[in-house]
Amino acid sequence: MSIGSFIRKQFIDVLQWNEDEEGVLAWRFPMQDFEIQNGGVLVVRESQVAVFVNEGQIADVFGPGTHKLTTQTLPVLTNLKNWDKLFDSPFKSDVYFFSTRVQTGRKWGTPQPITIRDKDFDMIRVRAFGMYSYRVLDARKFFTEISGTREAYTRDQVEDQLRGIMLATMASSLGSSNTAFLDMAANQALMAQEIKGDLADAFGRYGLGLDEFNVASVSLPEELQAALDERISAGMKGGLSNDKMAGFTRFQTATAIPLAAQNEGGIAGIGAGLGAGVTIGQAMGQAVGASLAPTAPQASPAPVADDSIEARLAKLKGLLDKGLISAADYDSTKAELLKKLIG
C-alpha cells in the first residue's frame, strides 16, 4: 500500500448512519484519526437529523437529504473556525446523528403508588399503567440536555430518565386537577387528557415530543380499595338519605348487629336477658331511625320496657320490622319466649 493511498484513507468522503442497532436515538460518527474531506457528502436519511459540533459547541444542523459540505453549507462552522472563502482542505469536527422516528409502544407504570390530593378523598395513593410514544423533536436541545458527547445514546437510557419525570408530572397534574379520582377512574381517556398536556411540556424541555399517551388501568392499593368498596356499599344501603356519611354510619351499625348476635349473650341467645338486649337495640334503633328519616322531628327517648313476655315479643317484632335482627334470630327468640309463656 502506497503512502498516498494510506493518506487518502484518512479522509472521509461520505458521512451517513445506517441505524444498524435498534433503539439507538443518538450516534456519534467515528472521527478518530480521520478528517472530513472538503466537498464531501453528508447523507441524512428520512427520520434523521445530523448535527456538527465544534469543540463542544453546536454548529450546523442538517435535516433529511444529501448535502455537499462546503463553507456555503457549513456557515456556522465556517465562522467558528475562521475559515476564509477559499477553504479547500480537510477538517475535523464531531458529527452526531439523531433518530427522529416515533418510538411506539413504550410502557409506563407506577411501581409504587403516588400520593395525590383528591377533592373527594383528600389524600389518596394511586397506581396506574399505560402506553406512550415519543420522538426526538429538537436535536439541539436533546444533545445539550440529555445525550451529550456519548458515542451512542439508547432508548432505554432516555426512558430511565423519563420515568422519574413522568411520575413527578403525573402527581402534580392529578393533584392540581379539579376532576375527582372516581371520575378519572371511570373515564381513563379523561385521566390521560389531564396528564398529557403537562407531560408534553416536561418532555419538551429535553427536546422530546410526546406523540401519544394513554392510561390502560388505574387502581388504588388494596387497603384503600377495600375502604372505597365499603364506602360504596354504604352508599348503596343509604335508603332515602342523600348524606353519604350518614349512609356509611348506618351501614356500619347494621353490619355490627349480626356480628353481636353471634356472640354469647347476643340476640340469638337473648332468653331471659332480653330486656337488656332490647335496651341496646332501642339505643341503636334511635340512631338508625334518625338517619333513615332525617326530615322527621327528633323522637323523645323511649321509656324503659316492662318485663312482661308479651311486651318483649312486641319489641322483638319491632326489631325485626326495622331490619335490626334477622328472621332466624326473631324465630329462635320468639320460640323461647312463647315456651316460657305457655309453660
Image: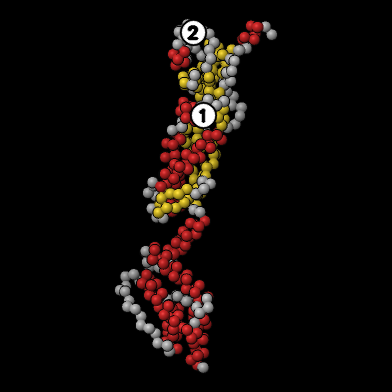
Using the rendered view, name the quadrant where residue 279 is placed: bottom left
| Residue 63: % across, % down | 49, 22
Residue that lies at the very extreme toward the bottom in this rendered image: 343
Question: Is residue 62 something that shows in the picture?
Answer: no
The label nearer to you, 1 versus 2, is 1
Residue drawn at the location 44% of the way across and 41% of the way down: 169
Disc 1 to disc 2, C-alpha distance:
32 Å
The residue that mark 2 highlights is 87
Residue 285 point in image, percent of width and height = 40, 75
Amino acid type shown at disc 2: Phe
Instruction: Name the foreground residue: 342 vs 183.
Output: 342
- Compared to residue 335, the image places residue 169 above or below, namely above
**Whole-percent x, y for residue 229 in the image:** 48, 60
Callout 2 secondary element: loop
The amino acid type found where label 1 is placed reads Ser
On the image, numbered disc 1 is attached to which residue? 147
Where is residue 39 shown, x and y percent of the image? Answer: 53, 11
Disc on the earlier residue, 1 or 2: 2
Which residue is at 41% across, 74% downward? 284
